[in-house]
Amino acid sequence: MKEKIKSLLNSQLVQVSSFTSISTLIKIGTTFISAKVLAVFTGPAGIAMLGQLTNFITILIQVSTGATGTGIVKLTGQYQEDKPQLKKIIDTSFTLNILFSGLVLLLIFLFQNQLTLFVFNDLKYKWLLYFVAIGTPLIAINNFILSVISGLHQFKKYVAINIFSSILSVILTVGLVYFYTIDGALLAYILTQTLIFFVSLFYSKTIQWKETISFAIDKSITKKLAHFSLYVIVSAFCFPFAQILVRNLIIDTLGIDTAGIWEGTNRISSMYLLLITSAIGVYFFPKISNLKTIQEVSKELNFAFKVFVGATLFAGFLLLLLKSFIIPLVLSKAFLPINNILYIQVIGDVFLIAKMLLSMVLLSRDKTKVMVFFEIIFTAIYIVSNYILVSSFPDLTNIIWAYPIYTFLYFLTLFLTYKRIVNVVEN
């Protein structure tokens, strides 16, 4: 019995989960500090503007890397013992990242006015796009390095980089927000994404990049990376793009402070869901991907529903119970209007987690094209729902219902699709 316990504690899964949990808890802590500083010094307007930038950078990261991150992790892990093939994977991935990031840098300089107006709705923030453009190659290479480290199962280094990223973020945010308020908050976010490259480079020095990397593209490797990139780039683009549109819509219709309340609701939601979504990523997807039969998948999915959806319901209930205390604590009293809409957000969150579990099941069963189609369709439904609600019921209490409508319909469609797959297999 003692040997089994010792073996379990020394297992890779337990070690990875432990490291990830530490990193996640530190991220929650630093996110809390950053959110509090932002809320106090910049108010709802600052939170709204940072939400726009965050969504823009999320899209930028995937486009500037060609959404190759997932493919790099998968292929480097698969061929880490095959040195010639591993070199081809690293060379091709690096070259693609350089090419894509160079293209994005050029496009930002060519369309900086249009992009500034789309993201910030004000040309006075044009100067930020220069920082984004210059940082794009570093952001892309940083994500390439992190993907290689993850694929090579160097989890301690991977977690250490993420911890440094969280600490760097809170230091820059507190310092720059204190002196420059909203401008400082936006600049801090860009600098964090850029400067973490040097931390990643330091921790990955054992890979000996100079001897490992050369500019080359292997067609077969590119095709394999493209297979993994399709859903990633669509999912990474669609919802952040939709959120930018919706936030602009709320700013134009109800004002930037209302958009800040909307964004504050999203931030509280993402904070309490962070531990749950991290656990799903570490445990559920690897587990479900290794199962062979549909009976095994159904059993694991039922267990995951009980654990993760149950955890979301419990966390959401506690949040609603303590909302009058939590909102001023995490943000500020300026965000107390969130009290009136938080229950709607929690309903959407429950269906979001259920949708996430089903999405991972379908992706693990090679239903990538189906998931790409669903992602595009339901993002469109989310955008249209917001436009209808804003034009018909121009009040945040009504507009926020677009989120649970979107997550419920998406979940229901995935559930029916999964049931159809099960019936086909069983028959």
Image (cartoon, helix red, strand yellow):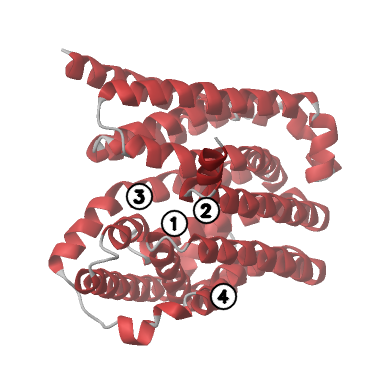
Tags 2 and 1 touching, CB below 8 Å: yes
Q: What distance separates the C-alpha of mark 2 from that of mark 4?
A: 23 Å
Residue 354 image offset from top left, x and y in percent: 47, 26
Q: Amino acid at mark 2?
A: Asn
Labels 4 and 3: the sequence-earlier one: 4
Give the label, 3 or 2, closer to the camera. 3
Q: What distance separates the C-alpha of mark 1 from that of mark 3?
A: 11 Å
In depth, the one of 45 and 291 nearer the eye is 291
In depth, the one of 131 and 391 nearer the eye is 131
Labels 1 and 4: the sequence-earlier one: 1
Q: Is residue 99 left or right of residue 400?
A: left
Quarter placement of the N terminus: top right
Residue drawn at 61 percent across, 38 percent down: 273
Circle 2 residues within 10 Å: few <14, some 14–19, many ≥20: some
Tags 2 and 4 touching, CB below 8 Å: no
Outermost residue toward the bottom in this view: 210
Placement of 68 over or under 327, stated as above or below:
below
Placement of 107 over or under 406, stated as above or below:
below
Residue 267 image offset from top left, x and y in percent: 65, 44
What label does residue 55 carry, if any?
Answer: 2
Give the label, 2 or 4, closer to the camera. 4
Q: What distance separates the C-alpha of mark 4 from that of mark 3?
A: 25 Å
Name the residue carrying label 1. Answer: 59
What label does residue 199 carry, if any?
Answer: 4
Q: Is residue 398 visible?
A: no
